[in-house]
Image (spheres, grey):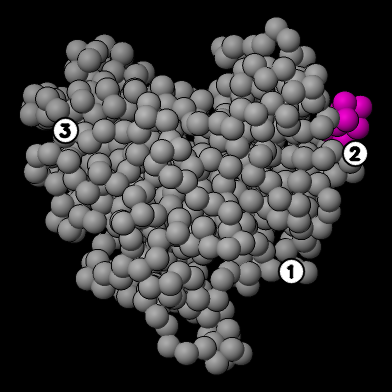
């Protein structure tokens, strides 16, 4: 199929469609197991997290709670979760353009745009909420490359508006919805860059004042999945639609809207004054195979629509930066945390969730660049002009990130990424040089001794991240007995045979549970062969399962978080 019709064609002629239709029909017939992957994808909708109900009742019960974006998918699910815990007053504020999601009879629904600073100031000052959940955002990576101005003014300046208005009004706490894509310390993509900049804004506000501020990172949410909506539309087009997939090897993490809403509630409980703590689900399961989901949809619908591998659209990174993950720690934490963030892991209010402290070094340049970005957005909506202004801010945020990174993790990252230098894009090379520059500066100042393979990531040799959290001063531990049996997973023989080519349970199915629990006997040890041979974007899945490189060949380089 890849040879028959080359990628990056906007339109296909009838002959090309006919060839692809025949090949797609053969592919559907050859992949009966795709139905199982499609069913697994749909089943993720039912997943949820365990919540400390007594703590939530004390925090939410009787409180005045404001939710931005409360009429969208995640926002409406969060509104339902909040309403069930009987707040004194529950208010949604949104633009009112999202329809079709359920509303709560006990809630108030108001209309304002987070981009309108005066309206947000007045609303928050009038309501004086005890808690704000900031969920409103422009969420489409592809649309972000087209509607650059709206994306930046919503995701960056809109977030700034909500946070500064909350601080000015004396709001005690704000919880921010973020994305797994923000694990990239730098990205030229508008959606990722805008959400990363929003995390930086929240970090500066959290560190400068008394307001509690925390966040949750989401990956691909099935309930409002753009990919699934497109697949359904193409399949239902009576065979005339063309199923356009970026690649034949894409796999991606998925979570449910319920998990997302509950993760925001956990971030509420996990906040600490003076810090910006970010929360993410530990165990997202195996990445879902996109081609299997597409084949499953076509088979279920009986559709004759052909599959075309069109190449990556703007807004979707084909090859992620190779220094995102450290093989010494990646398999023990959420794949939505990068190597620097893993080194800053802190206690979490739930054993199914990881948390870390997002630090940024003090920087006089970034605030000026944020002001410049706002000025540009007020002056023009030209996409290139706004893009360049955000990119300037993004490079400054990268410097602030690296300036605050844990020294052992920074030095180890510099050592690992150089192995991939020959295959780097110019952007990735610049990021690498920044990492090396910060690492070398620290080495020259501290006179650090040689880097130890396991200790270099902030852990003792052979120690798990979770064990490190249970050291004195890091109040985090969980026993298997504390996890409800209904939330413990069982070995999945279909999954294990598909990944490893063998029957029975794999190391992954034995070590993972729905609560993200790992037996204490399973520890991360250096594996130099794996360090140099595995694509960094799939390292969490590889290290987690302790599979050989050959056994994970089905997982693509694109298994890094997608949203």
Front disc: 1 or 3:
3
Reading the image, the residue beneath label 2 is 169
Earlier in the chain: of badge 2 and badge 1, it is 2
**Left or right, residue 236 beside residue 122:** left
Tell me the SS state at disc 3.
helix
Front disc: 3 or 2:
3
Residue 319 magenta-highlighted = no
Q: Residue at x 58, y 42 (%)?
A: 349
**Left or right, residue 352 beside residue 461:** right
Q: Residue at x 48, y 54 (%)?
A: 337
Measure how far apart labels 1 and 3 are at the Cα level: 50 Å
Reading the image, the residue beneath label 3 is 494
Reading the image, the residue beneath label 1 is 362
> Which of these two is toward me, 85 or 179?
85
Earlier in the chain: of badge 3 and badge 2, it is 2
Instruction: Judge whether 56 appears above or below 5 on screen.
Output: above
Contact between marks 1 and 3 (CB within 8 A): the answer is no
Tell me the SS state at disc 2.
helix
Tell me the SS state at disc 1.
loop
**Left or right, residue 383 beside residue 202:** left
Residue 379 in view of the camera: no
Q: Position of residue 29 (x, y in %)?
A: 8, 24
Instruction: Judge whether 123 appears above or below 219 on screen.
Output: above
Span colored in magenta: 119-128
| Quadrant of res 442 | bottom right
Earlier in the chain: of badge 1 and badge 3, it is 1
Q: Position of residue 428 (x, y in %)?
A: 44, 66
- Disc number for residue 373: none
Q: Position of residue 44 (x, y in %)?
A: 38, 27
Residue 125 magenta-highlighted = yes
| Quadrant of res 400 | bottom right
């Amino acid at each position: 199929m890849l040879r028959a019709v080359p990628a990056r064609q906007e339109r296909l002629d009838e002959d090309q469609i006919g060839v692809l239709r025949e090949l797609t029909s053969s592919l559907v017939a050859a992949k009966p197991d795709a139905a199982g992957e499609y069913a697994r994808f749909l089943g993720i909708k039912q997943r949820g997290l365990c919540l400390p109900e007594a703590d939530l009742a004390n925090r939410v019960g009787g409180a005045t709670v404001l939710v931005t974006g409360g009429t969208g998918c995640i926002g409406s699910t969060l509104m339902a979760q909040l309403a069930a815990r009987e707040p004194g007053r529950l208010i949604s504020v949104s633009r009112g353009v999202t329809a079709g999601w359920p509303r709560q009879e006990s809630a108030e629904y108001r209309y304002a745009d987070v981009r309108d600073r005066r309206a947000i100031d007045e609303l928050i000052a009038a309501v004086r909420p005890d808690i704000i959940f900031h969920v409103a955002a422009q969420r489409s990576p592809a649309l972000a490359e087209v509607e650059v101005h709206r994306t930046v003014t919503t995701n960056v300046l809109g977030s700034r508006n909500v946070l500064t208005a909350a601080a000015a009004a004396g709001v005690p706490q704000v919880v921010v919805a973020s994305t797994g894509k923000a694990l990239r310390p730098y990205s030229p993509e508008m959606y990722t860059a805008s959400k990363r900049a929003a995390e930086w804004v929240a970090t500066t506000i959290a560190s400068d004042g008394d307001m509690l501020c925390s966040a949750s990172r989401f990956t691909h949410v099935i309930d409002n999945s753009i990919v699934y909506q497109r697949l359904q539309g193409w399949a239902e087009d009576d065979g005339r639609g063309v199923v356009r997939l970026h690649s034949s090897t894409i796999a991606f993490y998925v979570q449910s809207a319920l998990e997302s809403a509950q993760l925001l509630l956990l971030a509420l409980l996990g906040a600490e004054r003076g810090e910006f703590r970010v929360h993410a689900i530990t165990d997202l399961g195996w990445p879902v195979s996109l081609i299997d989901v597409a084949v499953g949809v076509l088979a279920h619908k009986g559709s004759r629509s052909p599959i075309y591998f069109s190449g990556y659209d703007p807004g979707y990174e084909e090859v992620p930066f190779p220094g995102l993950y450290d093989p010494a720690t990646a398999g023990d934490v959420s794949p939505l945390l990068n190597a620097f963030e893993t080194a800053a892991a802190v206690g979490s209010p739930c054993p199914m969730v990881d948390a870390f402290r997002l630090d940024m070094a003090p920087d006089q340049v970034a605030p000026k660049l944020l002001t410049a970005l706002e000025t540009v957005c007020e002056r023009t909506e030209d996409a290139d002009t706004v893009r360049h202004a955000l990119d300037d801010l993004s490079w400054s945020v990268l410097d602030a990130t690296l300036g605050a990174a844990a020294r052992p993790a920074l030095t180890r990252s510099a050592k690992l990424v150089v192995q991939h230098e020959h295959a780097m894009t110019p952007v990735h090379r610049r990021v690498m040089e920044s990492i090396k520059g910060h690492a070398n500066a620290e080495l020259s100042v501290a006179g650090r001794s040689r880097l130890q393979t396991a200790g270099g990531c902030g852990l003792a040799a052979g120690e798990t991240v979770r064990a490190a959290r249970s050291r004195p001063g890091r109040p985090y531990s969980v026993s298997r007995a504390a996890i409800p049996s209904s939330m413990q997973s069982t070995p999945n023989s279909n999954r294990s045979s598909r990944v490893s080519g063998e029957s029975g349970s794999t190391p992954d199915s034995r070590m993972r549970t729905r609560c993200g629990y790992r037996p204490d006997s399973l520890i991360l040890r250096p594996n130099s062969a794996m360090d140099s041979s595995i694509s960094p974007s799939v390292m969490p899945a590889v290290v987690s399962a302790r599979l050989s490189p050959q056994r994970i060949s089905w997982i693509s380089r694109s298994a890094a978080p997608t949203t």
